[in-house]
Image: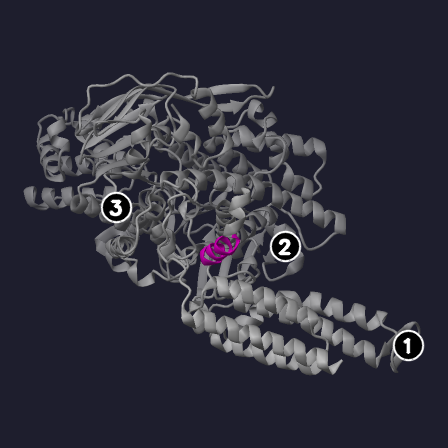
Amino acid sequence: MSISYGERFTTFPVLIKIVLKNKQTGYKQLPEDPNRIVVKDVSFSYDIMDENEHIAPRLALDGINVSIEKGSYTAILGSNGSGKSTLAKIIDILEVPDSGKVVIFGKDAGNDDLFWDIRSHCCVVFQNPDNQIVGTMIEEDVAFGPENLGIPNPELRERVDQALKDVGLYELRNREATALSGGQKQKLAIAGALAMHPDILILDEATAMLDPSSRDDFLALVEKMRMDKGLTLITITHDMTEALRCDKIIVVDKGKAVLEGAPEEIFMLDNLWDYGLKRPVKFNFAFEIAKLTGSELTKEDLVSDDALLSAIEKMLAKPGIKTPEAALEDKRLDEAEIIMSVKDLSYTYDGSDVKAIENINLDIRKGEVLGLVGESGCGKTTLISHMNAIFRPKEGDVIIHTKDGDLSCKNKKDTMKIRQNVGLVFQYPEYQLFEETVFKDIGYGLKKMKVSKEEAAVRIRDAAYLVGLTDKELSSSPFELSGGQKRRAAMAGVLVMKPGILVLDEPASGLDPKGRQEMFKIIKDLRDSGTTIILVSHNMDEAAKNCDRICVIDRGKIKAVGTPEELFENNRAEELGIQIPRITSFSGLLRARLEKKYPGITFDSVNFNPEKEAAAIVRAVCGRGGACA
Amino acid sequence: MLNNISLGRYYPAHSFLHETDPRVKTVLYFIYLVAIFMVKQPIAIGVLTGIIILQMILGKITPGIMWKTVKPILPLALFIFLINIFTIKDGTVLFSWKFIRVTGYGLERASIMAFRLLLLIISTSILLTLTTTPLKMSDALEGIFKPLQIIKIPVHEMAMMMSIALRFIPTLAAETDKIMKAQQSRGADYDTGSFINKVKGYITVLIPLFVSSFRRADELAVAMDARCYHGGKGRTKLNPLKLTARDVLAGIMFTLLAVLIVVIDLSLR
């Protein structure tokens, strides 16, 4: 059955698959529904080599059943490794099921004659923008798909131009694709898909590597294309608020579709955490108010912001609410000593006329979590690269204040001392592991510092336990670990140096909600144990919630520094051009309503933790003489 | 630091050479390769330099861009220059100190050798890399070597592999840079220590680079698969190569110039 599969350009593990599958008999006919994507009882396993070089199948899909309507907008959610990406590949016949049936709009995917027909009408945009660009020039890349389909000129030219116009890259069509920003590269991928005139578009975590503004931009574009071209849109995502935009959510866990329903149905459920998921921030907030007021929310309340706000108002008016206790104020760090000062720092890359960073002045206080926020390319990475002398300051300086005196990043002799004091974890650090075992990898820096073997062993274990790795993982190869574990191992490799200051570049990117939460738990533990943390983040919700102070960088300059409260109160965020945390914008709507209803009501300052904010709202209503006990 | 490599990079512009058929440019490149290796007389080399400067103007390549391309080669050119100057002992002695003896003939030969290397690099980048996108270059090679398909040589696949390799040079250069920085911040030191230590240091960079290249290759293969790539059969081209009269004329003109140079060179011997 698989002659045509054999022609695929693909890599060897998949080839093994194909050979194995040739032995199977063809699919049975299904009752064909021309308006649905039907995945029925599909199982699929990857063949991986175990330690003894035996092929060991790893089950990715375990009899999954999914049905998606034509023209709908579906989100597939699930934890890392749940099988959701494999499901996407099955729908595009990039993988062939071990068993079960796939019927796309009435066409049986097991039928060889329909193979190219199905695949050419289904397009996938993957997570990593760099790894899906084939052409050097933008228009060459867009043409790659239709060229493969054998579309002749002039239609080919028309398709390419139209697709580029649709995504807004037409003016750049003769530029190099590698020169684009991350968001633009993903738009290019969309253009490449549109030029194939697809019926189905699958986004496989396509927004995971984008900053919030390019993410919104990208989603708005994709949704517009869906409306204009009548696409069936399937998005695989870890972002719960993104999933809210869809008509339907399918939750995948351990290779099975465990939940299916409209967003308001799914997010009513209490057991999402079991699947590594959680509710969108505003729902978290609403459910917390429900808990505090002893009321229940219904799924109708979750349908729109308006409905939800009305429901919350009603709950707050309920008689007999117990006043929640005031949250304890976190300790203020204004008085803490300064541990690092960045002074008049500027940097220009070779061959560029624009300063990547310009006149940065910033004091970092001992024990704080300082957030660095700003759009991609604003100079955050350039700035943090100066903090441990990876970039030597050309103009200005970075001074590290230690017990043994000040260290200047300008001073070459201090370099090693600085790197021991300031640990720097770059984005996706798991891609930099290289040793045979995790133990050795974590110990790499200690070896360079010539720490004795005995002491190193103790410190390696300490660092590993700190990030939640066990002895079992320490003895295995770093390449055998799961994505989240790899990230922790890479972090431990920096923590093992016991740095007083830890700089983290997007430590939670690409992780599922549970993984993110665990990562922030680690960060909080580190802070509590006295480590000063500088956190680069795109996610304003997490930055506001976890940082003591936030520094906003825009085009290489510091635009504002202050506590999250200072930055996000009284619409200052708008003026600064940064995204408002979702909880703040939603709670703001509620506060405005309550102010109308209870004239003279006073609120605490905004809280970025949805649970605490919920308590603050309930307390405010009680204080205004609501119906509290 | 690796991002600044312009060797093998395309320079986007609209120029006579950019618009010339890449097959013509590839053939011309081979002709000039031969010419550069044949000329020995300073006058002929002077004329050759003039023609290459003319090509540079026709390709709208600024001296700045050219300098970036040539810069990484300078140490090698210098090395060739020194080797020649110290090993050629014929001719009148200009300078002598202990065992070192510099002769007039040696100086002349050394200069010519080093200069020819630079011309080679400049000519390659003008005719090929700077003015031709990798995809066009692979189209050209595919076009030129198409007859080999008869003897079952997978010309299309090889051309596609080449263009992908070129497309990933900047990506992998950026990745290398990232890995080196991450390891430096963990105490790695690539600049000091013995030669062995330096080599060892680079191995720790190469492993993650290899692993990530395989991952990229895997992801790219899936992405190409998703975009229905199935080899060269039945593929169309957005910008199919079209040989115009102008291309042929340019080809003939520059070929004649190359022949002229060789003739000048041979007649002066």
Q: Position of residue A438 (x, y in %)?
A: 59, 31
Q: Is residue A383 magenta?
A: no
Mark 1 Cα within 10 Å, few/some/many (few <14, many 20+)? few
Q: Quadrant of residue A598?
A: top left
Amino acid type of the residue that numbered disc 3 sits on in the rendered structure: Leu
Q: Quadrant of residue B102?
A: bottom right
The residue under the point 34% across, 38% down is A205
Q: Nearer the viewer, residue A44 or B199?
A: A44
Are discs 2 and 3 less than 8 Å apart at CB? no
Residue interval drawn in magenta: B135-145
Q: Quadrant of the N terminus of chain A?
A: top left
Q: Nearer the viewer, mark 2 or mark 1?
A: 1
Q: Position of residue A429 (x, y in %)?
A: 51, 41
Residue A605 is at least partly visible in this image? no
Q: Nearer the viewer, residue A574 or A164?
A: A164
How many numbered discs sit on the rendered protein? Answer: 3
Amino acid type of the residue that numbered disc 1 sits on in the rendered structure: Trp
Instruction: Assign a secondary structure to mark 3.
Output: helix
Q: Which residue is mark 3?
A: A219
The residue under the point 24% across, 55% down is A162
What mark, if any, has residue A415 been given in the picture?
2
Q: Which residue is mark 1?
A: B97
Q: CA distance from mark 3 to mark 1?
A: 74 Å
Badges 2 and 3, same chain: yes
Seen in the picture, residue B119 relative to B168 is either above or below; the reply is below
Instruction: Assign a secondary structure to mark 1.
Output: strand
Q: Nearer the viewer, residue B106 or A310?
A: B106
